[in-house]
Image (tube, grey):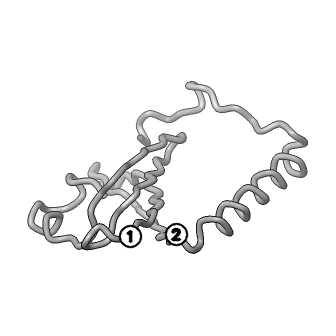
Amino acid sequence: MYREDYDQARFDSREAEDVYSKPVRAGKRTYFFDVKSTKGNNDFYLTITESKRRNNPDGSFNFDKHKIFLYKEDFEKFSEGLSEVIEYIKQNCFHGEIPKRSASDVDFDEL
């Protein structure tokens, strides 16, 4: 989570603590990989957030966000499944070549 997404009081009262964060910008979406610790710092987990900016008819905007919580006991199976599906797509859907995006493909008004 990012401080600008929430009011300060709510952010400070959360039970989890941010340990590490890696944002990945991908076209119209941004993915956030956040390592968090539980209260007491005795365990860790990963949140994966997809965020996409939506423009409203009145000119304002908001962000649609979808979040997955991934716990340590699921890391291995999740990683294996994700790798398998990505490899399948590479081999069967794009014939071994994933199309590359260029700067001209990005609609900067959508970001």
Amino acid of disc 2: Lys
| Figure quadrant of residue 102 | top right
Q: Which mark is residue 43?
A: 1
Q: How far from the left and from the top, in percent, is residue 32?
A: 43, 52
Q: How far from the left and from the top, in percent, is residue 62?
A: 32, 57
- Note whether 110 is above or below 39 in the view shown: above
Q: Distance between the residues labelled 2 and 1?
A: 9 Å
Q: In this view, does 97 lie to the left or right of 66?
A: right
Nearer to me, 32 or 106: 32
Question: Which residue lies at the image location 40% right of the left edge and 51% below the top edge?
Answer: 53
Question: Which residue lies at the image location 33% right of the left edge and 65% below the top edge?
Answer: 37
Residue at the spot of label 2: 72
Q: How far from the left and from the top, in percent, is residue 97?
A: 83, 36
Amino acid of disc 1: Asp
Nearer to me, 82 or 7: 82
- Note whether 40 is above or below 1 in the view shown: below
Secondary structure of the residue carrying tag 2 is helix
State which quarter of the image contains the N terminus: bottom left
Q: How crowded is mark 2: few (under 14 residues within 10 Å), some or many (20 or more)?
A: few
- Whether tag 2 and tag 1 are in contact, CB under 8 A, the answer is yes
| Figure quadrant of residue 51 | bottom left
Question: Which residue lies at the image location 38% right of the left edge and 70% below the top edge?
Answer: 43
Q: Earlier in the sequence, mark 2 or mark 1?
A: 1
Residue farthest toward the front in the current orientation of the protein: 42
Q: In this view, does 21 lie to the left or right of 70?
A: left
Q: Residues within 10 Å of mark 1 (few under 14, many from 20)?
A: few
Q: Is residue 21 left or right of residue 25?
A: left
Q: Residue 103 carries which label?
A: none
State which quarter of the image contains the C terminus: top left
Question: Which residue lies at the image location 75% right of the left edge and 36% below the top edge?
Answer: 99
Q: How far from the left and from the top, in percent, is residue 96?
A: 87, 40
Q: How many marks?
A: 2
